[in-house]
Image (spheres, rainbow, N blue to C red):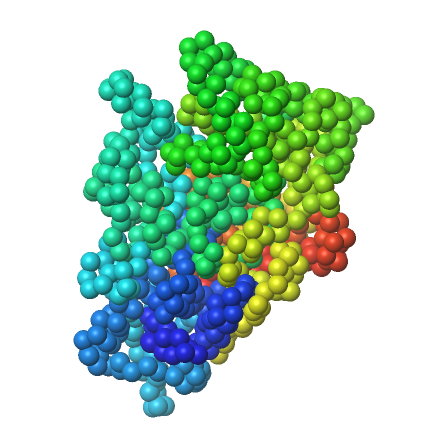
Amino acid sequence: MRFDLDGLDVFFPYDRIYLEQHQYMRALKQTLDGGGHCLLEMPTGTGKTVCLLSLITSYQFANPGAGKLVYCTRTVPEMNSVMEELATVLAYRAEQLGLQDGNDNDVGNGADDDVQMVDIEDVAGKSTRSNTEDENDTGKSNEADTAAAGSTSSNSRRKKKRRRVYRRKDGPPMGPISDGKGAGGSGCLALCLSSRRNMCVHERVMKEADREAVDAACRSMTATWVLDMAKKNPGSIETCPYYDAFHSAGEATTLPSGVYDLEELKKWGKERGWCPYYLTRQAINHANILVFNYQYMLDPKVAKMVSKELEAESIIVFDEAHNIDSVCIEALSVTVNERGLEQATRSLGRLSSEVSRIKASDNQRLQAEYQNLVNGLVDQGLLEAPANDAGLAGNVLNADVLNEAVPGNIRRAEHFIAFMKKIVEHLKSRLRTVAGPNGGVQSETPLAFLHRMMNGTSLEAKPLKFAYSRLTSLLRTLQVSNLDDFNALTDIADFVTLLSTYSEGVARFAIIMEPNISSIPGASDPVIQLACLDASLAIAPLFKRFGSVVITSGTLSPIDLYPKLLQFEPRVSESLQMSTFRPCIRPLVVTRGSDQLAVSTKFDDRGDLGVVRNYGAMLVELCSSIPDGVVAFFTSYSYMESIIGEWDGMGILRQLTKHKLVFIETKDVVETTLALDNYRRACDSGRGAVFLSVARGKVSEGINFDRHYGRAVIMFGVPFQYTLSHVLRARLEYLQTHYQIREREYSVWMTERLVLAVVSRYSSY
């Protein structure tokens, strides 16, 4: 469908549009026209993704100066889904523009469509009336494989009409588009960017299991000093042939117009012998549409490497952003424990030995670094490191700090190492005090903690602001490839940098020291947590830098809390409802088991064997009558593990496997991804499966169980926040004091949005 929306020619790749989709796109256009930010809520399954992509890409096409579309997602499956929908939208636009140029009266994928522009108000009205009459309309989503149902005949006995779709049988066109004028009929370039683990094509590196190992293996073959050594002594050290070919090609390493998901990028890079990861990093500046994770925009350590060159006219979209405040807080929070401090001590010993070795063999390298540090962070290029060396980037720094020279007492490597040793020893002493017989939970403001640190170590506050960047410079000078060995030391440098930077003014952070956070009886694990209390700190630079930031999700209610939490004034703030004409969801609350025993997940009752048995019997009974996939959510990992153990002893799991295969979410991302793949295979084969997961886990946040993958969802208990958490209580107090958000209001809101997010992950018949 091609229609006019308040003067904008919109290319929408489906033959019908829902009323709420029309309202959603109109609100989005008002935001872009007025140059401001917006909050938009529309229920999951109503086609937010296709509305966003259709409207914004049409707006870019009509306004070439609009800038890039930066679409932020939370998970790789979401990223792939967005790229697939984007390919469909751009393919439809290219087809429409091609037919228009050829003066053809047949447009779209159907031969009975008309070229002329249609009135969106008429279409929305017809769509609403058609939905009322059509009893065979089985879903709202036109993000899935089908578009909206066709209209029914006027006969009393209505015949089913097969849904018409614009998607091709082999899926939307991905990769380079050489037909006509390129992707979208205008030469668009759409890219997605992920970690090295998801984009690497090197055979040996791909065998590594976790992200840290992949990053370390990649840096060991692509770092600048590795390439220099290989150039001086060919064959003396292993390098990556894909990166070598990419580096040698220089300006020739460009991507033609097209839509590239992760698989297409890997395919394109492998065919030409170029590294897909660095190829994408280089092509970002030339792309019209970018899709990547939230962290590339919100985490300052990552954002400065990837999104620093985005123009101010760019349109930033945060999809499924109901938890965006939590993401912002996590990006600026640091936890230090006893084990990390011991590892940091060993890391400092390694650095000290390496500095002594280099002073004896290549002292000029250290002297050159010292001279650069005298010139200041910006002048010395620390924040502009080569892409293959930028394992660490500058942390949150004030503008005046960036232009200052690094303080003299930490310029020399040996002085900085001694400086960090004092900090580590001070943190160890604080942990011993907390874990001692007279210890206990302690809470301090950053200013009070910093004051005690300065008195205990005789250090000044100013050098602490440079700790993270100074460590980055030292690791680069020492040519360290495996940066993950220094993660603990990096966390401590991050800790003191944030501490000193935000110690003045309103206390937006809290220092929480706890003697034991371990769930293992008898174990001791004291920690010091630098907890960010203000979610606006991470996202404020985006609101200031970019003209339009769109925050959207299916579960933002109550929507008026987000402007308070994120401290911004939305130009448009709307909550749209789904226009339903039949019961789409059948909620059922179960309070008693088949033996009439009350069931509950309250802490006092959750270990009761009668409750455990009734929950298991209910799950078995439901799985015996519900076909295909069933998803069950628990309140926490520990509760899920304990109840599964009890079910195994009672024989409930054996009964369950008679009806469906059982898959379980774990904290390991690789294991969970494999379990999800096998779960879908079991549902596709007709065997059926049940997926046991956690309400606050990765599965609940970013995986859609649509169609036969989610015939039913079961929630064992209500996932309330752990109100005894000292970090949570500090944040609740901060919200009450500064934003007048009451504790109960915030706790209920957090629980409601989590439950809504979980339930909206599935769509049944």
Toward the right, the furthest residue is: 438
228 or 328, which is in the foreground? Answer: 228
Residue 561 showing in the rendered view: yes
416 or 653, which is in the foreground? Answer: 416
Tell me where residue 672 appears, x and y as whole percent: 44, 43
399 or 425, which is in the foreground? Answer: 399
Give left or right: position of 8 versus 402.
left
Q: Is residue 89 above or below residue 642?
A: below
Residue 320 showing in the rendered view: no
Please report the residue visible at 36 percent of the width from the left and 28 percent of the height from the top. 223
Location of the N terminus (image quadrant): bottom left
Tell me where residue 663 appears, x and y as whole percent: 44, 46
Please report the residue visible at 30 percent of the width from the left and 78 percent of the height from the top. 161
Tell me where residue 125 appears, x and y as whole percent: 44, 84
Q: Quadrant of residue 332?
A: top right
Tell me where residue 704 appears, x and y as whole percent: 44, 57
